[in-house]
Structure formats: structure tokens, C-alpha cells
Amino acid sequence: MQMTSNNRRVVALIDDDAAVCDSMRCLLEAYDLDVQTYQSGPDFLNEEEPGIDCLIVDCYMPGLDGLELVSELRKRGSQVPIIMMTTTTNSAVQRRAAELGIKRFLEKPFSHKALLSAIREEPSLVVYPSFSNLRSR
């Protein structure tokens, strides 16, 4: 697990909607996470740094979609945990996601509570003290 110089876990957030990135970054930073945002899969792949603790990615983006991005990461040997955001899930998407090791989905629009719950369930992040008290905030 990568920790930034201030001992915060690193979450990469990939969504083509800048407003989604901004609002989620503000929320997650309030829980002491270091959030790196990207507007597309290729942007992330070009700048990817090793040690991301969790990746939150939109399933449906123009160009390289979220499943294609995760597939490319897996080909490169990355086993980073993924939380997939989607406007709709179907059996084909769920099947492909399972093949890629994606276990957590957030259906848009989702609440802050749902986002925090998905993150709380991610083992690479729950060890950080701020996340052990998510329900109390």
C-alpha cells in the first residue's frame, strides 16, 4: 500500500464528468484519503503511479470504458482493488467485471453514504483510522 508523505491512503478516481470527480474528491479528502482524479482511462494509464490503494472508475466513458481500463491494468499485472460506478448493470457487465476481479459496484446516482460504505468494505482502506468511524461522521 502506498502512503503519501502525510500517511494518507491513495485513491484514484476516473470519471469523464468533472463535477462527479470534484464532489467525490472533496468527500473522500474529508476522510483523509489522497485522491487523484482523471477524466479518462488513457489519462490514468499515461500517469499511473504504482501503489494506488483503490481505484474508483466509471464503467461507461467515451473511448476506453471502465471495463477496458481494468482489463488493461490486469494485463499489466495490477491487482489494485476496483469500485465500479455505473448507470446500469446487466449480466454481461457483471460477468466481465467478475472475470476482472471487480467485486463492488455503485449504481449512479449514489449517495455519499453508499460511496463511503463501498470504501469501508475495501480491505486496503479500512485499516486507516478515519475509515473505522465512517458511521459516526
Image (tube, rainbow, N blue to C red):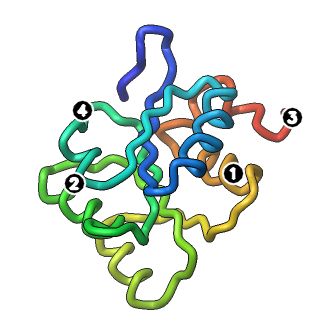
Secondary structure category for the residue under label 1: helix
Lower sequence index among marks 2 and 1: 2
Q: Viewed as shown, does residue 117 lie left or right of 76?
A: right
Tell us which disc is closer to us: 2 or 1.
2
Q: Which residue is mark 2?
A: 73
Lower sequence index among marks 3 and 1: 1
Distance from the alpha carbon under mark 2 to that under mark 1: 25 Å
Q: Residue at x 70, y 62 (%)?
A: 110
Among all residues in the image, which is located at the extreme bottom? 91
Secondary structure category for the residue under label 4: loop
User: Which mark, residue 117?
Assistant: 1
Tell me the kind of residue under disc 3. Answer: Ser
Q: Viewed as shown, does residue 109 lie left or right of 71?
A: right
Tell me the kind of residue under disc 2. Answer: Leu
Among all residues in the image, which is located at the extreme right? 136
Q: Residue at x 44, y 39 (%)?
A: 37
User: Which mark, residue 136?
Assistant: 3
Distance from the alpha carbon under mark 4 to that under mark 1: 25 Å
